[in-house]
Amino acid sequence: MRQLWGLPVLLLSAGIAFGQLKTLRPGFDMFTPQQDVQLGKEAAAQVEKTQPIVKNAQVDAYINELGHHLAQSPHAGSFPFSFHVIYDKNINAFALPGGPVFINTATILAADNEAQLAGVMAHEMSHIALRHGTHEASKGNVVNLLAGLAGAATGNGLMGALAREGISLGANSVLLHYSRDAESQADYNGAQIMAEAGYDPVQMAEFFRKLETKGSDGRVAQFLSDHPSPGNRVKAVEEEVQLMPARSYTANTGQFQPIRQMVSNLQPPRPQ
Ligand SMILES: [Zn+2]
């Protein structure tokens, strides 16, 4: 009889849990968190060698202030984040494992307000916190990858180990190309980061919806290919916000418009 009694109580508590806010955790991963950081450092060095990184003290200071404010959120995890701007007319942003976040100048120009830019950053930071890049890379040939990672520990470099498995930073790299599930997770976790930092999470979803309506514009192609829409982003975030404690979203540095103006006047960085 005791067991029969237990059943309805169990169902009832499961029903309550359904309507609660979740804290997402990283999935299966063959890399250690330290290897995420190491891989991200090696990959960021490649990006910095090949991409026109903006070297403007005010733009850098702004993007770092915003990023480090978002990083205070418990949902941002504990990776050492860094934030960089790339001079590029294509609207894109990407995250490397273990901390580096890159944002194209066109993304700053396409955002209507600071909350939308914070939303892109919180979304990218969530891919890092939830370790989506190395999770994807872990789906390949397990035996070879393990051997490669062990070899990398002896000093050959993780990018080199991954290159032997056909994984690079090129177009559609598994390190940067996420599943729709990963996208939903990054939206969900990113919304929590935003709310905890004082920004309206719906602005993140609104910005992605805006990009999706520009689908035929080639300038958003890479972003939409790397971050495939899970569908109904705005509705999903609105429903999530209903589960959050009531807050007023008043965070604003007051610097977004002047920085955006400055970015619109930037000259292309000289090739290194
Ligand atoms: Zn994404």
Image (cartoon, rainbow, N blue to C red):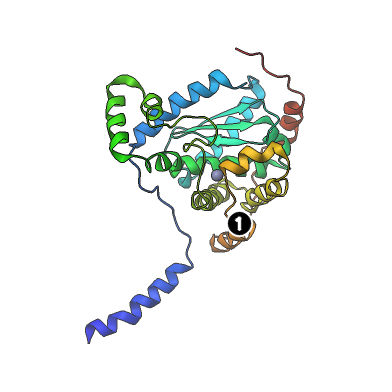
Position of the C terminus by quadrant:
top right
- Quadrant assignment for ligand 1: top right
Could you say which is closer to the camera, residue 194 or residue 176?
A: 176
Can you say whether 9 is above or below 32 in the image? below
Q: Is residue 254 visible?
A: no
Q: Residue furthest bottom?
A: 1
Image position of 1 (left or right of 9): left
In screen coordinates, is 146 left or right of 60? Answer: left
Q: Residue at x 37, y 40 (%)?
A: 140
The one nearer the camera, 32 or 219, is 219
Residue at mark 1: 231
Q: Position of residue 201 (x, y in %)?
A: 61, 51
1 and 91: which one is in front? 91
The residue at the point 47 percent across, 33 percent down is 99
Measuring from the top left, give residue 104's x and y in whole percent. 64, 31
Q: Position of residue 203 (x, y in %)?
A: 66, 50
- Residue in the image at 49% along x and 49% along y: 182
Q: Position of residue 78 (x, y in %)?
A: 42, 39
- Name which residue lies at 74% across and 26% down: 262
Quadrant containing the N terminus is bottom left
**Is residue 194 placed above or below 65 in the rendered structure?**
below
Above or below, 164 relative to 195: above
Q: Is residue 237 visible?
A: yes
Q: Does dot 1 land on a helix, a strand or a loop?
A: loop
* 15 versus 23 height, above or below: below
User: Label 1 is placed on what type of residue?
Assistant: Gly
